[in-house]
Image: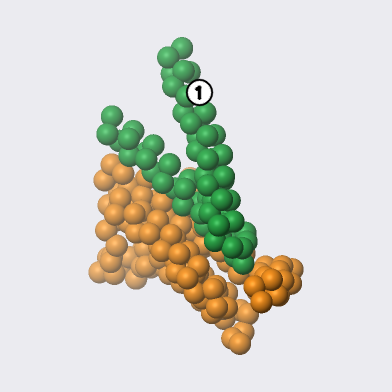
Amino acid sequence: MMSGLYFVTSLIILTLVLAGVYSLAQDPFAARERLLRQWLRRSLKLVGVLAGIMLLAFFLSRV
Amino acid sequence: MKSKWLVLGLSWLVPGYGFFVHGLRRRALILFLAIEGTFALGCMLKGGVFLPEFRWGHEGFNIVTLLTFFTQMFNGGGAILSLLPELAGRRWAILPYDESYCFADLGSFYLLVAGGLNYFVLMSTYDHFYGRKRSLRAEAEESTK
């Protein structure tokens, strides 16, 4: 149970860091507000995809 | 201005150096902390970087291990520190790697992500300061005047 929590938390943390570094690397001269908006947008998209995969895995494990 | 290859080499060793040397100091610090923070978390979970088997016919040869190694090596300084015990002997084991620890694989995954992140930053340094996106910098400076 605990190890699953570690893995899921890690996935979320790494997704947030990835989205942040990617946004900054893609547009290093952008204004701070624009970077924050892009970071948030990318993070939400990626976390949404992760949540979808987790739900799919959860329901498939019940079949 | 320092030579392109020196800056890229140092950016490989120290994430964010390329941004720092071109005046984006706060952003360089953010990149450094994000990448080395990920690396440090991986080390705390006792992950490590290992030399893979390069011989094609050998039973230990594995394409996933090879790709993992190359990606981890993009975070130059940290990856070299992690590789030291394998290259120079056990007494150089500075980082707390422990293969038997239950989260060691997860830790190695953090190191893989840190390498991938520095790859983004290296490519961005090349593109924005030396390559095809160089003009964007002038535009950004123009718009802030």
- The number of numbered discs placed on residues in the rendered structure image is 1
- Position of the N terminus of chain B, as image quadrant, is bottom right
What residue is rendered at 28% in x and 66% in y? B94
Residue with the most extreme front position: B145
Residue B49 visible in this rendered orientation of the protein: no
What residue is rendered at 48% in x and 45% in y? A15
Is residue B54 shown above or below A29?
above
Residue B28 visible in this rendered orientation of the protein: yes
Are there few (<14), some (14-19), or many (20+) residues within 10 Å of tag 1? few
**Front residue of B29 and A34:** A34
Label 1 sits on a secondary structure element that is: helix
Q: Which chain is represented by green in the image? A: A
Relative placement, left or right, of B142 versus A29 is right
> In the rendering, at what x and y percent does residue B14 appear?
46, 72
> In the rendering, at what x and y percent does residue B44 appear?
29, 54
> In the rendering, at what x and y percent does residue B64 appear?
52, 46
**Front residue of A6 and B66:** A6
Q: Which chain is represented by orange in the image? A: B
Three-letter amino acid code at disc 1? Leu
Q: Quadrant of residue B80?
A: bottom left
Q: Quadrant of residue A62?
A: top left
Q: Tell which subunit mark 1 falls on.
A: A
Is residue A43 shown above or below B18?
above
Q: Mark 1 = which residue?
A: A56
Q: Quadrant of residue B4?
A: bottom right
**Front residue of B66 and A48:** A48
What residue is rendered at 46% in x and 18% in y? A59
Relative placement, left or right, of A62 versus B22 is left
